[in-house]
Amino acid sequence: MRDVIAQALKTALKAQDKRRIGTLRLINAAIQDRDIANRGAGKDPVSDEEIMLILAKMVKQREESAKAFEEGHRLELAEQEREEIAIIRDFMPKQLGDEDVQKACKRVIDEVGADGLRDMGRCMAALKDKYAGQMDFSKASGIVKSLLQ
């Protein structure tokens, strides 16, 4: 995954795509920050799965920022955030649609054998293991909660 991002950065530098260059550098910085934190804790460098989680977090942050900019009538800044989201999503697996998220939640509830809200944590952990970077887990959480009630 690191190689793919590094290659994309080289391509963006050659094409002088300023938005893409900046976003890819932010991705690399976030990965390096996590590497440094892991090194301090005596852990291994960041794996591809952890990179997917980092990218998902970056997308979520930008979605929140874009929403805040829209509410503040700063549409040009909201558009910049959306452009960054599109660049980050290029490196993530295809996002599951609402119907697929619903099916995945039902499947995980059956697999875990959940029968109440007290099993929600186990269900969410299983979803995060299986579908890292492929769905919005805050939406999935709401679906799991409604199915368990």
Image: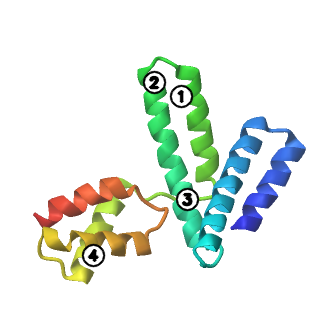
Which numbered dot is residue 78? 1
Q: Is residue 101 left or right of residue 84?
A: left
* Quarter where residue 83 is shown: top right
Query: How far across and how far down the image is residue 92, in percent?
Result: 58, 59
Contact check, label 2 and label 1, Cβ < 8 Å: yes
Question: Would you call the spot at circle 2 few (<14 residues within 10 Å), some (14-19), or many (20 or more)?
Answer: some
N-terminal label among 4 and 3: 3
N-terminal label among 1 and 4: 1
Look at the image and tell me in which quarter the N terminus lies: bottom right
What type is the residue that disc 2 sits on?
A: Glu
N-terminal label among 4 and 2: 2
Q: Is residue 99 left or right of residue 73?
A: left
Question: Would you call the spot at circle 4 few (<14 residues within 10 Å), some (14-19), or many (20 or more)?
Answer: some
Q: Residue at x 78, y 36 (%)?
A: 18
User: Which residue in the rendered view is the most extreme toward the right?
Assistant: 14
N-terminal label among 2 and 1: 2
* Residue depth check, mark 1 versus mark 4: number of the one nearer the observer: 4
Which numbered dot is residue 54? 3
What type is the residue that disc 3 sits on?
A: Ile
Q: Residue at x 33, y 54 (%)?
A: 138
* Quarter where residue 144 is shown: bottom left
Q: Secondary structure at mark 3?
A: helix
Q: Is residue 146 left or right of residue 97?
A: left
Rounded to the nearest whole Å, what is the CA distance between mark 1 and mark 3? 21 Å
N-terminal label among 1 and 3: 3
Answer above or below: position of 74 versus 7.
Answer: above
Contact check, label 1 and label 3, Cβ < 8 Å: no
For disc 4, the marked residue is: 122
Q: Secondary structure at mark 1?
A: helix
Rounded to the nearest whole Å, what is the CA distance between mark 4 and mark 2? 36 Å
Rounded to the nearest whole Å, what is the CA distance between mark 1 and mark 4? 36 Å
